[in-house]
Amino acid sequence: MAVNKMEKMTIIAAADREEAILQAIQGMQAIEIKDFFHSNVDSSYIEKHFASTLVEEDESKKKRFQSMLTEIQDSLTFIERFSENSSKKKPIKRQVRTLHSLEESFDEHKISEYLKEIALLKSKLAVIEATRKDLLSKEKWLARWQYLDIIPKNNSLESTDILLGSISSANQTDFLADLEKVSSIYVEEIYHSQNHVYYSLIYLKSQSADLNGVTARYSFNQFDYPYDILPKEAYQKNKEELASLVKDEKQVKVSLSSYRDHLEELYLAEEMTYAYIYREEAKKHLLNTSYFFIVQGWIPVDEKQDLTSALQDRLPQEEVYITFDQPTNDEIQVDIPVKLKNNSLVAPFEMLTEMYSLPKYDEIDPTPIMTPFYMVFFGMMVADIGYGLLMLFGALLALKLLVLPRGMKRFADFFLILSFPTIIWGFIYGSFFGAALPEVVFGIHLPFPILSTTEDVNTILILSVIFGFIQMLTGLMVNGIELTKRKRYLDSISESFAWQGLLVGILIVVLGMLVFSNDGLVTTGIVVAVISALSIVIVPIIQTKSKVKGLAKGLYGLYGLTGYIGDLVSYTRLMALGISGGSIAAAFNMLVEFMPPVARFTVGIVLIIALHALNLFLSLLGAYVHGARLQYVEFFGKFYTGGGRAFKPLKTEEKYMNIEKIQKKKNSGGI
């Protein structure tokens, strides 16, 4: 239960074996590829003797897959958005597969044909949409002129002409009055909207100058009628074309809906395309020549045998050279990645450590030490049997019925484990969805609540501080042990063991004075505390050349006792959140109980479910955040530095499936 031990892997093989070896590495999802020319490797020999054979990685294949990925994603979006839903959509199940089986089922030619056909349908639909917009615009225009009973092109004579246009409704009266001053003009109002009036003007060509003066004065907006048929006929023809477009669009969507049967193929093609792209990106970090290639990477020690077996399954043993080397001190300091390794109980809590910072490769993993404290604290802050059972059954159902993405599965495991301390603390507080557990059942007296959230508040407060005190001592102990391992013996005294002695001495004094009234305990506690305090002050004096500076440093370090007091106060949130959550749940129950019987068993049922769901969400969120804060500030600050680089193996996207080394039985569940 610690940081996974890593070794440096080197593989040399013929250039034509590159794809097969990278596929095996990617299928394991447990090897991080190193950049050969930017790693701690002397590559001068290669550059000197094989410079003429070195080849640059071809980017065309990667670009081809990136282009295909974009087309697949666009096609999936297009199908989901525009295809007819007459046939029931088949759910796409999340799967568990090996990369090898996924790659075998991938038919690039077939997928390319699908994409071409879908792109053609998409183009047709785009043309239909553009045509529709144009026809709708014409329909709006023709609707205003459909009552014009002449064809302007056919009714212009040698001496007369027709002018079509509109003016603002506000200028209508003045416009008509000025037109009356122009002789020999016929005015017909065709359409009157809220803001504009549309006119047909028949006039003598000899009067065009006078008419132009009037139209210019009132900003007459002239229209050119483009059709050879009456506006009413053009309007009807336009509507028929729109109706025909609807049929065409429906036909395209029906054709598109047939591709719903190929959705799973497209989803898996997207998954495989991601895998190809990542594999092509990894090739940038290899050394490639015309004859052979070299790949280097970091591999967990327990994956070495699996890698050897995977390569032997694909290639003859004599065609691959593989070696494993221990990391150097320089690589440990600047290059080596960190992967945590814990048992199934502790592993879900690794995400808390990752949120803070991964440990350095040569640093202790705090997750196993933190886990029991976090479990106790979380349970104490939620502390309800009903809420714990909901967490338990919800997590179990998700894990059993669904194939979850790895991150979601870890989260489900996390809450599954935390449901047990939540139930246990629910029994301690005697709370079931905010209701008190019965004290007597069938004449048997039950011990619940062991601690009452109304009568034992002070006891719960003291218990919270005790838990915090134990965690702080644990953090100091871990720090002392780690410093001792590094042979920093004086630091282990001043930064760890002396502080433990000081805190324990103060505890003995408090117990001797307030609990046992024992002068001997008080004296013992004072002696232990004084010796520890002197150690905190004296050690910096010994370590520093300037004794005055050492004394100042020691006294300043001793002043840190106030920080420990503040840390202990922080643990009182365990009491506060536990009591507040239970009190809110009880208040919700009381609210529904006050309702009339009819409302209580109708609206009240919906209300109580909604209110408890809200309280459960807030309780889980508060316990999650505040529990993590106690670990990050009060606990990790005592011994943990962090700063490790996360292990990033060559893997797949795992967008629609979980990739495993060995094919596992599929569970049911949707994406």
Image (cartoon, helix red, strand yellow):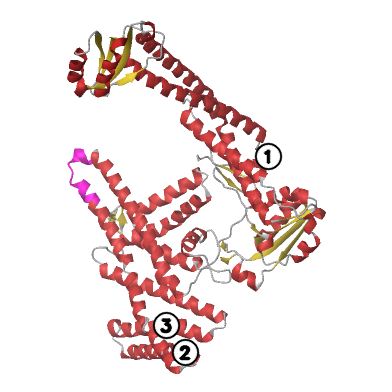
Badge 3 marks a residue whose secondary structure is helix
Q: Residue at x 66, y 37 (%)?
A: 105
Q: Marks 3 and 2, Cα distance to the nearest angstrom?
A: 12 Å
538 left or right, relative to 47? left
Find the magenta span and give its range: 588-601
Q: Give the mark toward the camera: 3 or 2.
A: 2
Q: What mark, if any, has residue 104 been given in the picture?
A: 1
Q: Give how far across and how far down residue 410 sits, in percent.
A: 50, 54
Q: Marks 2 and 1, Cα distance to the nearest angstrom?
A: 67 Å
Q: Nearer the viewer, residue 599 or 503?
A: 503
Relative to 79, residue 536 above or below: below
Q: Give how far across and how far down residue 561 sits, in percent.
A: 36, 81
543 left or right, relative to 133? right
The rendered magenta stretch, by its main secondary structure, is classed as: helix
Badge 1 marks a residue whose secondary structure is helix
Label 3 vs 2, first from the N-terminus: 3
Q: What mark, if any, has residue 539 been given in the picture?
A: 2
Q: State the residue position of label 3.
A: 499
Label 2 vs 1, first from the N-terminus: 1
**Callout 2 crowding tier (Cα within 10 Å): few <14, some 14–19, many ≥20:** many
Q: Marks 1 and 3, Cα distance to the nearest angstrom?
A: 62 Å
Q: Residue at x 32, y 48 (%)?
A: 613
Q: Nearer the viewer, residue 670 or 455?
A: 670
Q: Amino acid at mark 2?
A: Val
**Callout 1 crowding tier (Cα within 10 Å): few <14, some 14–19, many ≥20:** few
